[in-house]
Image (tube, rainbow, N blue to C red):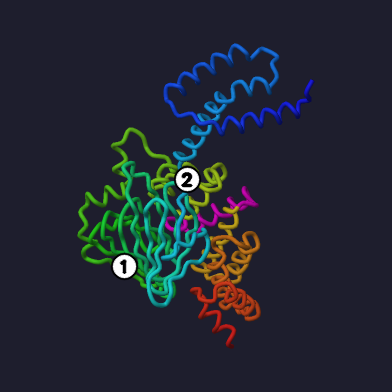
Amino acid sequence: MECQETKLENFGTAVREALAAEISSTDEIRQARDGFLCEFAARSGTKRSWTSWATANRWRILLLTSATTAGVVALWAFSPRPVTFQVGAVGATGRTGDLVQAPAKGPLPLRFSEGSQVTLHEGSHLRVLATDKRGARVLIEDGTVDVSITTTRTGKKHWNFEAGPFLVLVTGTKFTLTYRALERSFGLSTQEGQVVVSGACLSSPTPVAAGTRLDLSCLTPRTVQTASLEALPASEYERAVPSATSGKASRSTPTWHELLAAGRLREAVHAAERANFTRVCQTTSAKELLALADAARLFAPTARAVTALHILRQRFPSSAEAATAAFALGRIAFERKHAFSEAVQWFATYLQEQPNGPLHGDCVGRLLEARVRAGDKTGARSDAEQYLRRFPEGPYASEARGILAK
């Protein structure tokens, strides 16, 4: 009697031979399929060897294998996958987290697999921090970009553009965004559709509809907005950023989860406070906690964001979100508290926990800046050398060269 391995080998040979067979008639395929199922059911309890059964029914195995393969291929083809992107005219495959910088002369396009495009103006640089099936999260480090986000019938696109302390929520539109890191200035003009801008310089999320422009600077005591934006109809504003009072007409009050997912960040923070902010931080997931902390950084007292970030690091100590929380704590220490030595510790913590993380370039640049402010000249020189080795044309390159020239 043949051993089991020999039987399996013979069965494999029969399958390969069956796959080489040519079957083209639709009626023959249907009849063969029906016959195969009936015979298989009748013979499933017999003791015929694998070899003889497979040899006699090789063309039926072909049909079953083909149908199974087709089903797997169809399932793969129709399953939603994260968007990908290509950089430049040659279409080099882009990687999340990498610095993308336009040349000194000429623009640089990024083309996304679902049809959207982001074009960097001369000398501008950004990072695609993350992608998913609905869109991407993009960090504009410095410069100007033209953005064209495709629309869908379902309207389930979700794109975020970060620029310093500003956040732009997008579903489908065309706009131009400018961010100058040194001046902390922000400008956005919309050609089609509408976006919603949030930031520390804004008292509430602000919609920017087609034909309007928004100009902001966190270094100036007053936020400057153009007259065209001030003239935006109230109906447009309410559609883009529903107020807390407008929600009263609904059948139920949205939870902080729902408000956060909808981009209504200020309301999400207030809803979390009503539900006991600390308890919320102790029970939610790492990703939602990081998003809630970021919303609190923009629309709540600094202590709220700090609380959320510390709880995140305590509950998820080895996660990527915990490292990002360290980076956020460094930003708060630097920008809000002017505690530069503390900022150094947090930025160094991020680099230790995520040495190749998506925020690496920005973190090294901020670290050397914090060391300079803290009076650590030796550490600043070391960081400057590290930065120039990896990002010779990065946004902190000139500052790094200045440190090394002293």
Residue type at mark 2?
A: Arg
Question: At 60% from the left edge and 79% from the top edge, which residue is drawn?
Answer: 375
Name the spot of residue 190 as percent of width and height, x first: 28, 60
SS assignment at label 1: strand
Instruction: Tell me residue 371's x, y (percent).
Output: 59, 75
For residue 255, which numbered disc appears in the image?
none
Taking the image as shown, residue 391 lies to the left or right of residue 379, namely left
Label 2, on which residue? 81
Quadrant in the picture for the C terminus: bottom right
Give the class, few, some or many, for how many residues have Cα within 10 Å of label 2's Cα (few <14, many ≥20): few
Residue 401: x and y, percent? Answer: 55, 82
**Looking at the picture, which amino acid does disc 1 mark?**
Asp
* Residue 2: % across, % down: 78, 23
Asked whether 281 or 366 is in front, the reply is 366
Mark in front: 1 vs 2: 2
Q: Tell me where the magenta segment starts and ends, as one range.
A: 296-319
Q: Residue furthest bottom?
A: 406
Q: CA distance from mark 1 to mark 2?
A: 36 Å
Q: Toward which corner of the image does residue 244 lie, by quadrant?
A: top left
Above or below 292: residue 338: below
Assess whether mark 2 and mark 1 are in contact (beta carbons under 8 angstroms).
no
Choose between 188 and 263: the one closer to the eye.
Answer: 188
The residue tagged 1 is 215
The residue sitting at 51% across, 31% down in the picture is: 22
Q: In the rendered structure, does residue 241 fall within the stretch colored magenta?
A: no
The one of 230 and 13 positioned closer to us in this rendering: 13
Q: Quadrant of residue 52?
A: top right
Apparent side of residue 206 relative to residue 364 in the rendered image (left or right): left
Give the residue drawn at x 47%, y 59%: 128
